[in-house]
């Protein structure tokens, strides 16, 4: 009986040591960190999307014949707002890529909108427009910071999940490497600058 008790204690201690060394708890913590940093990216994208209607309305009053640009911005915002974003997006590379493309379209449409405003000195002088433009610029900076944090968090997670012995635990519980942000194709090509 005494031998059985000692064997049970030894088995319990060795099991505890084995499971603490497998990385399960750390995998869970790192997975949660990825989710939290993604939530911050989402938060900043939502802030940007919330600014767009106000910006479009201010520009509409000045740039009546720029309807195409205003429509593109509104459609880009609708595309972004229409995407369901949850943990599945982080786990599915195709959904993640579609989400990145929608955000890229939003960025591109906003850039065109701000370029159009250069043709309207009265609009550029409008206090409400200037305030919205400053808020939008600040939000774009926040998006960049949040994306960089997400990239770092995913890198940390992916490095950990691929190391031994965690890779064994990750395979058993179904945790794979996560998709990360990547530069869009247009970012790979230098812009054409002309002073004609």
Image (tube, helix red, strand yellow):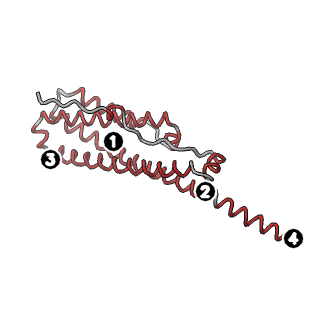
Residue 3's disc number:
4
Q: Earlier in the sequence, mark 3 or mark 1?
A: 1
- The quadrant where residue 82 appears: top left
How would you rate the neighbour count of disc 3 (Cα within 10 Å): few for under 14, some for 14-19, many for 20 or more? few
Image coordinates for residue 27, horizontal then vertical, percent:
57, 54
Binning the other alpha carbons within 10 Å of mark 2 as few (below 14), some (14 to 19) or many (20 upward) gives many
The quarter of the rendered structure image containing the N terminus is: bottom right
The answer to which of marks 2 and 3 sits earlier in the sequence is 2
Mark earlier in primary sequence (4, 1): 4
The residue identified by callout 1 is 49
N-terminal of the two: label 4 or label 3? Answer: 4
User: Which class describes the residues within 10 Å of circle 1: few (<14), some (14-19), or many (20+)?
Assistant: many
Tell me the distance, in whole angstroms, between the alpha carbons under discs 4 and 3: 83 Å
The location of residue 182, given as percent across then percent down, is 40, 39
Query: Label 3 to label 1, Cα distance in Å?
Result: 20 Å
Q: Nearer the viewer, mark 4 or mark 1?
A: 4
Up/down of 10 relative to 19, above or below: below
Residue that badge 3 annotates: 127
Tell me how far mark 2 sits from mark 3, CA to CA.
Answer: 55 Å
* x 68%, y 63%: residue: 17
Specify the quadrant of the image occupied by residue 104: top left
With respect to residue 37, does 61 lie above or below? above
Circle 1 — which element? helix
Write the residue at 13% across / 39% down. 123
Give SS at disc 2: loop
Residue of label 2: 23
Under tag 3, what secondary structure?
helix
| Image-based side of 30 in relation to 164, left or right | left
Q: Nearer the viewer, residue 85 or 2?
A: 2
Q: Is residue 161 left or right of residue 64?
A: right
User: Is 172 displayed left or right of 190 in the figure?
Assistant: right
């Amino acid at each position: 009986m005494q031998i059985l008790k000692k064997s049970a204690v030894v088995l319990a201690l060795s099991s505890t040591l084995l499971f603490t060394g497998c990385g399960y708890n750390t995998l869970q913590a790192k997975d949660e960190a990825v989710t939290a940093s993604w939530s911050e990216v989402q938060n900043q994208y939502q802030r940007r999307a919330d600014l767009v209607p106000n910006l479009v309305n201010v520009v509409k009053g000045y740039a009546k014949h720029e309807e195409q640009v205003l429509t593109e911005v509104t459609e880009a915002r609708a595309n972004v707002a229409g995407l369901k974003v949850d943990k599945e997006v982080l786990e599915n590379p195709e959904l993640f890529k579609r989400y990145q493309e929608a955000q890229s379209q939003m960025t591109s449409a906003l850039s065109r909108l701000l370029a159009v405003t250069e043709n309207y000195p009265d609009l550029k002088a409008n206090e409400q427009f200037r305030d919205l433009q400053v808020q939008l610029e600040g939000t774009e900076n926040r998006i960049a910071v949040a994306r960089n944090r997400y990239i770092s968090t995913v890198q940390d997670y992916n490095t950990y999940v691929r190391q031994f012995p965690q890779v064994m635990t990750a395979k058993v519980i179904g945790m794979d490497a996560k998709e990360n942000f990547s530069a869009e194709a247009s970012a790979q090509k230098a812009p054409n600058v002309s002073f004609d």
